[in-house]
Image: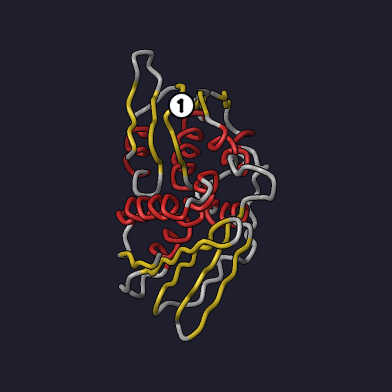
Amino acid sequence: MFDIDFNDSGQVVVSGRLDAAQAPRARQFFDAINGGCAVDMSGLDYISSAGLGVLLSTHKRLMAGKSGLELVNVNPHIRDIFRYSGFDRLFVIRPA
Amino acid sequence: MKKTYRRSFDQIAEIVADTERFFAAEHLDPGLRMKVDLSLEELFVNMVTYNTETDRDIQLEMRRVTGGVEVCLTDYDVERFDPTIERQVDIDAPLAKRVPGGLGLYLVLKMADSIHYEYHDRVSKITFRNIVAEGTAADHV
């Protein structure tokens, strides 16, 4: 189960499991974003390389316009994946 | 546990559900789940994506071993592809030089406590283990 939507504060909220089967849906959502935004990951239980790819390509596109993604409320498991992937050096990451 | 899956990303949800049932039945440390799920997905996705010359199902076997779990994926009638060969991924590269892709097998090698590849008669078999470190809880990746 994976879900993605905006909350009332304009943050992107992702929850559940962002795996290879769900990555196309996440990509479609992020592709429609044209400015910097925060991504609330408090409900995200799992992310694989397919999900990492979506975040990376979105962040690169937005950074070209001097904005980007900020990843907030990241749980320790997901943060470890980001660390192994070097994403902790590419994104602003705020732990839960 | 021994089961086969169609060559489709749609099968990932079923693999996750089966893994969850296996962990519960075997009373395995839930702290190992993230590592097992990640390695399993990355290897399965790799087989589905690149071993396109066959339409045979992929076999998954999972068994309890001392201190953890052993997972084996078998792909039939395919070319040799050894995922245990170290892949160069520059995780220190700046954003401008990072490109999506290539992280999957890199993460598998980081996550697995051991990994082994066999190839005979066009059968590709990958076995990995995740073990709880003695005296510690496997609550982090």
Query: Which residue does the image show at 57% across and 25% down from the upper left?
Result: A95
Q: Quadrant of residue B73?
A: bottom left
Q: Position of residue A25 (x, y in %)?
A: 32, 40
Q: What residue occupies the far bottom of the structure in this picture?
A: B121
Q: Position of residue A76 (x, y in %)?
A: 57, 33
Image quadrant occupied by the N terminus of chain B: bottom left
Image quadrant occupied by the C terminus of chain B: top right
Q: Nearer the viewer, residue B62 or B65?
A: B65
Q: Nearer the viewer, residue B138 or B53?
A: B138
- Residue topped by disc 1: A42
Tell me if A10 is positioned left or right of B109 in this view.
left
**Vertical side of B90 occupied by A43: above or below:** above
Q: Which chain letter goes with mark 1?
A: A
Query: Which residue does the image show at 65% across and 48% down from the upper left?
Result: B90
**Vertical side of B126 occupied by B21: above or below:** above
Badge 1 marks a residue whose secondary structure is: strand
Query: Which residue does the image show at 49% across and 42% down from the upper left?
Result: A52
Q: Position of residue B112 (x, y in %)?
A: 60, 56
Neighbor class of circle 1 (other Cα within 10 Å; few <14, some 14-19, many 20+) is some
Q: How many marks?
A: 1
Amino acid type indicated by mark 1 = Ser
Q: Quadrant of residue A26?
A: top left
Q: Nearer the viewer, residue B107 or A58?
A: B107
**Vertical side of B69 occupied by B116: above or below:** below
Q: How is the image coloured?
A: secondary structure
Query: Which residue does the image show at 69% across and 50% down from the upper left?
Result: B134
